[in-house]
Image (cartoon, rainbow, N blue to C red):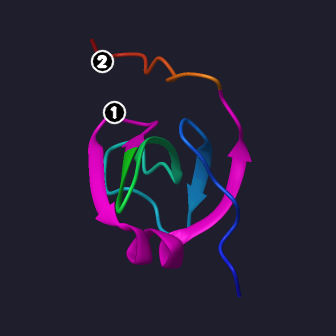
Amino acid sequence: MLPPEYSLYDEVEMKRPHPCSARSKRFQIVRVGADIKITCLGCGNIIMMDRDSFNQKIKKVIAKNEGPIKIFGKK
């Protein structure tokens, strides 16, 4: 099965939630290359993983955005 098409600043849903207080499955892609960098939309933490791991863990693309999303509670 092929992973969904994604690009920079897309909002994605992962298979497992982030272990923060928000338990969010929603992330935003902030860097695309050999590695993928995503930001948790619940707490703002940044996670970096290789493309193969990301392709295994992504569930679907929720929305396509033009720029970064402002996360409330984070400067």
Q: What residue type is labelled 2?
A: Lys
Q: Are marks 1 and 2 in contact (CB under 8 Å)?
A: yes
Q: What stretch is highlighted in magenta?
A: 39-65
The answer to which of marks 1 and 2 sits earlier in the sequence is 1
Marks 1 and 2, Cα distance to the nearest angstrom?
Answer: 7 Å
Mark carried by residue 52: none
**Magenta segment: does it hold 46?**
yes
Q: Which residue lies furthest to the bottom in this view?
A: 1
Q: What residue type is labelled 1?
A: Gly
Pick the quarter of the image with the N terminus. Answer: bottom right
**Magenta segment: does it hold 64?**
yes
Is 63 placed above or below 15 here?
above
- Direction from residue 14 to residue 34 in the image, left or right: left
Q: Which residue does the numbered mark 1 point to in the structure image?
A: 44
Q: Where is residue 43 in the image (x, y as percent from the top left)?
A: 34, 35
Query: Helix, strand, or loop for circle 1?
Result: loop
Q: Where is residue 46 in the image (x, y as percent from the top left)?
A: 28, 43
Q: Which residue does the numbered mark 2 point to in the structure image?
A: 74
- Direction from residue 51 to residue 57 in the image, left or right: right
Q: Which residue is rendered at x = 27% and y = 11% of the image?
A: 75
- Direction from residue 40 to residue 68 in the image, left or right: right
